[in-house]
């Protein structure tokens, strides 16, 4: 009688929800990078290497580079980190693929 209440959710439905959740997280992160000022000194870094070493790791500066890109400052972006442009393209591509997969599963009525 109450078996449907306690049964495990369908795997495609979970995959579809994960696609949407990941896409929302990437868009939120990119929005945060777009709204922060990359020229200001930040109080906190998510890079644990920068907590111990002044220079940080090989990825340090990517957030600043993407922030500069959202402002159209290509030279400042390149100086912050040369891989800022490819990183932004990869993140935008990832969001596109996630939303495409989400909509593809939705088109087969796997809700």
Image (tube, rainbow, N blue to C red):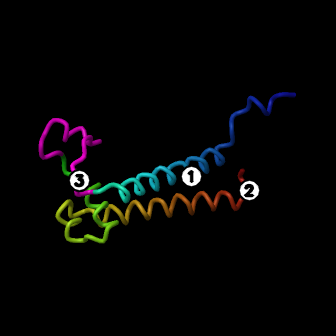
**Cβ atoms under marks 2 and 3 closer than 8 Å:** no
Residue 54, how many percent across, how many down?
Answer: 12, 43
Residue 3, how many percent across, how many down?
Answer: 80, 29
Residue 33, how many percent across, how many down?
Answer: 35, 55
Residue 6, how many percent across, how many down?
Answer: 74, 29
Q: Residue at x 32, y 67 (%)?
A: 71
**Cβ atoms under marks 1 and 2 closer than 8 Å:** no
Please say if 22 is above or below 73: above
* Mark sitting earlier along the chain (2/3): 3
User: Residue 99 colored magenta?
Assistant: no
User: Residue 41 colored magenta?
Assistant: yes
**Res 52 → quadrant:** top left
Of labels 3 and 1, the one closer to you: 3
Query: Which residue, given by chain and number where applicable, does mark 1 sit on?
Result: 20
Query: Which residue, given by chain and number where applicable, does mark 2 sit on?
Result: 109
Judge left or right: residue 16 versus residue 44.
Answer: right
Highlighted range, magenta: 38-56
Q: Which mark is residue 40?
A: 3
Marks 3 and 1, how far apart at CA: 32 Å
Q: Residue at x 60, y 57 (%)?
A: 102
Residue, far left = 54
Q: Residue 93 carries which label?
A: none
* Mark sitting earlier along the chain (1/2): 1
Q: Which residue is drawn at 44% across and 53% down?
A: 26
**Res 9 → quadrant:** top right
Q: What element carries label 2?
A: loop
Query: Which of 71/81 is in front?
Result: 71
Task: Rate crowding at label 2 as few (under 14), some (14 to 19) or many (20 or more) other CA atoms within 10 Å.
Answer: few
Marks 2 and 3, how far apart at CA: 47 Å
**Cβ atoms under marks 3 and 1 closer than 8 Å:** no
């Amino acid at each position: 009688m109450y078996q449907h209440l306690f049964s495990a959710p369908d795997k495609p439905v979970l995959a579809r929800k994960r696609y949407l959740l990941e896409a929302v997280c990437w868009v939120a992160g990119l929005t945060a990078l777009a709204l922060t000022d990359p020229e200001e000194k930040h109080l906190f870094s998510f890079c644990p290497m920068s907590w111990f070493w002044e220079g940080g790791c090989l990825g340090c500066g990517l957030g600043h580079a993407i922030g500069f890109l959202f402002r159209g400052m290509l030279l400042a972006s390149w100086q912050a980190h040369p891989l800022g442009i490819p990183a932004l393209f990869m993140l935008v591509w990832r969001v596109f693929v996630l939303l495409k997969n989400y909509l593809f599963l939705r088109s087969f009525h796997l809700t």
